[in-house]
Image (tube, rainbow, N blue to C red):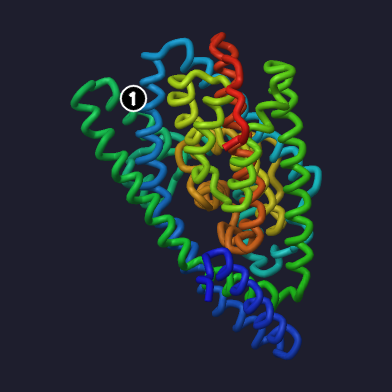
Amino acid sequence: MKKINLTGWILIAMVFGGMAGYIVHEFGSPRFIEKFSANINLLGKIFLLLVQMIIAPLVFSTLVVGIAKLQNLATVGRVGGKALLWFLSASLLSLLLGLVLVNIFHPGTSLDLHNIDAAAAKDIVKKTQEFSLSTFIDHVFPRSIIEAMTTNSILQIVIFSVFFGIATSALGEKGKLVVKALDAISHIILKMVNYVMAFAPLGVFGAIASVIALKGLEVFRFYGLYLIYFVIGIFFLWALLLLVGWIILRNRLPALVKRIAQPLLIAFSTTSSEAVFPKLTSELEKFGCREDIVAFILPLGYSFNLDGSMMYMTFASIAIAQMYGIHMDTGTQLTMLLVLMLTSKGIAGVPRASLVVVAATCGMFQIPPEGVAIILPIDTFCDMFRSMTNVLGNALATTVVSKWEGELGLEVKTGLAA
């Protein structure tokens, strides 16, 4: 019998959670339904607490190491600057597109959760509406990094990490020891992400059963609309990326897409853009990109240029706010976009790590992070599309920078695009 993977267990948990919730919704008394929903949701709460447990060390360790890499860009000068320009522009475009589309489609409004805890919802809305420049500054600058970590004040951790990373890089050889240690720690924390995700099926079961017990089967309508709207967003993102690629690469763009077709398919089927890294490296070199440019830009792109994941973060965060009936004005949403620009770097390439970023962002903006457990069942299918988009974005970034450098050679013709 073939071993069931995590995706399979999540889908099984969704089905059984839906069945349990539906039975309670149809045959339970109002008092029993309320009690059942509160108790079964504790499974989702446990999963959420485990996710929140790793947020602070994950952001700190990966961001410091990422900044150390950015400091190294100064030594490669022109190539690094062009790569960074592409990374930041593509990330901003992706985040902004997700923000625009989620405000056009309003996927979260198809699942109304705000009346589950009316008092808490009102308090959250009040806090969100009071989010001003003054409160933003309070959120940015930490009085104590220990306090920031214990409260998961994500932006304060980012500010401290930026200063820490720059200071560490300035120390030279002594700093390299710290960077090496933090790099090892970051890999340990990323491994912990996999362990935490092993609890995801229980969290999904509890969250789905709780919601359906209260709301009925309308949650499944939400999943269908959520996936459709996200795929539409991915289509627009591909169109924008390919348009920019055509402007720069012209008639070589179709050949590039054909060359990376196999890595794209693998990333889609495995929901992992990192799984195709060796294959993508080989195909880009065969396409004509210089070996040292590929070796430099592609690894950085896997930390700083994951376009599909970027778009998903704004899309998912605002959708969760919509589920809870929380109105976020334009200024607050743009602030969230800038926060995601910083917090997402270095950790978005790990499967489902984008959900960790979404949970942290929701917590900062007073959005119930419990919503992450609600979107988790559909996240697997969204992950297929965003992983494939990540591969396209990094292939374009490497090829475009090679073109800007005048180092894009002729494609190596082979019998098979092996």
Location of mark 1 (residue)? 166
The vertical placement of 20 against 185, above or below, is below
Which residue does the image show at 53% across and 72% down from the upper left? 2
Q: Is residue 139 left or right of residue 318?
A: left
Residues 200 and 103: in front is: 200
| Extreme residue toward the front, this view | 415
Point 49% across, 62% down: residue: 48
Q: Quadrant of the C terminus?
A: top right
> How far across and down, in percent of the image, does residue 272 sit?
54, 48
- SS state under label 1: helix
**Would residue 290 be found to the left or right of residue 400 on screen?**
left
Residue drawn at x 52%, y 38% as measured from the top left: 279
Residue 162 occupies which quadrant of the picture?
Answer: top left
Out of 6 and 163, give the one closest to the viewer. Answer: 6
Up the image or down, 141 lies above or below 7; here it is above
Left or right: where does residue 156 sit relative to residue 168?
right
